[in-house]
Amino acid sequence: METIRTVTTFLFSGALAPFGGHPAMLSLVPLGLVMGAATLLFVKWTSNQDAIRATKARLSAYLYEMRLFPDEPLLIWKAQMGLLAANARYLGMMLVPVLAMAVPMVPIFAELECFYGHAPLARGQEAIVTMQMKAGGGQGSAAPALLAPAGFAVESPAIQIEGDRQFSWRIRALRAASGDMRFVFPGQTAGSAITKSVEAGAGPSYLSTRRVSSALDLVLYPAESRLPQGGIEWIEIRYPEATVHALGLDLHWLIWLFLLSMVSALILKKRFKVAF
């Protein structure tokens, strides 16, 4: 799992790095075109195209029948029943590629969320850093010391909440910078400290909002390696959520990507000879 995460993170962060600090739409447009083309190929390879075309033709026939015989209740009723049955068959056939696409889409969207979902801290902006401890993790109840990298300041002592299993600090970005925060528990040295990345500057940028210990959570938070074995469940920094501005609208990046990929798929479906 860690090897896969390392490879995918290297590929995505490297591919998106040239677009860092530029308007997000500059990279979302070509990404949407690629996603649209990839969706068409995926549907073509994982669905029965002949059956889909036949079912769509049957749907059209039932609709024409309802328009041609408006004064024949029995025919209208039969056409409506046939329309419902054909529509159910169509949805069932399209369910296969949708479920198949969900498998690679989850880690892909998790990687894209690292780049588009949140913005780095601005100069002078504060954020909350939280460490969640495991139940019976063995680290004890004493709060660790938080050491911030250059360009950041720790502005509050550790606040212990949620049944003595969660510690929170407030930090502030002093300038554009990046580095690793270090968490040193009593009896530890700085060299054995647990680290968590932090970044301030212009976005979009590939960010790690949370560093986790669970292999399953790593699918959703792939930007940093898993925490070492011990009593820490996760460490999180609350970056501000980002939106993408275009056409006078500020929307979540996933909405723009969906719209761009759908437009791309509609434009390219005849060239790819795909029915959906």
Image (cartoon, rainbow, N blue to C red):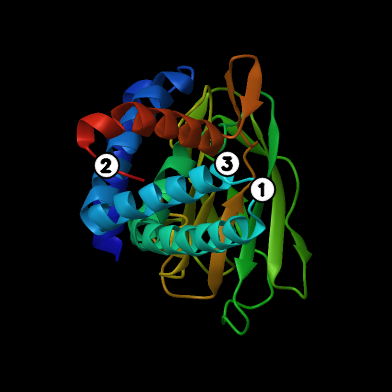
> Residue at 45% of width from left, 60% of height from top?
86
- Where's residue 238, x and y in %? 64, 45
Q: Please tell me whether mark 1 or mark 3 is closer to you in this view.
A: 1
Q: Nearer the viewer, residue 192 or 212?
A: 212
Residue found at the very far front of the displayed protein: 71
- Where's residue 272, x and y in %? 21, 35
> Residue at 57% of width from left, 37% of height from top?
118
Helix, strand or loop for disc 2: loop
Checking the image for residue 67, the label placed there is 3
Q: Is residue 89 above or below residue 201?
A: below
Residue labelled with disc 2: 274
The mark that comes first in sequence, 2 or 1, is: 1
Q: Please tell me whether mark 2 or mark 1 is closer to you in this view.
A: 1
Helix, strand or loop for disc 3: helix
- Where's residue 41, x and y in %? 24, 44
Q: How many marks?
A: 3
| Distance between the alpha carbons at the discs numbered 3 and 2 | 28 Å
Does the image show residue 184?
no
Horizontally, residue 271 falls left or right of residue 35, namely: left
Helix, strand or loop for disc 1: loop
Horizontally, residue 155 falls left or right of residue 191, namely: right
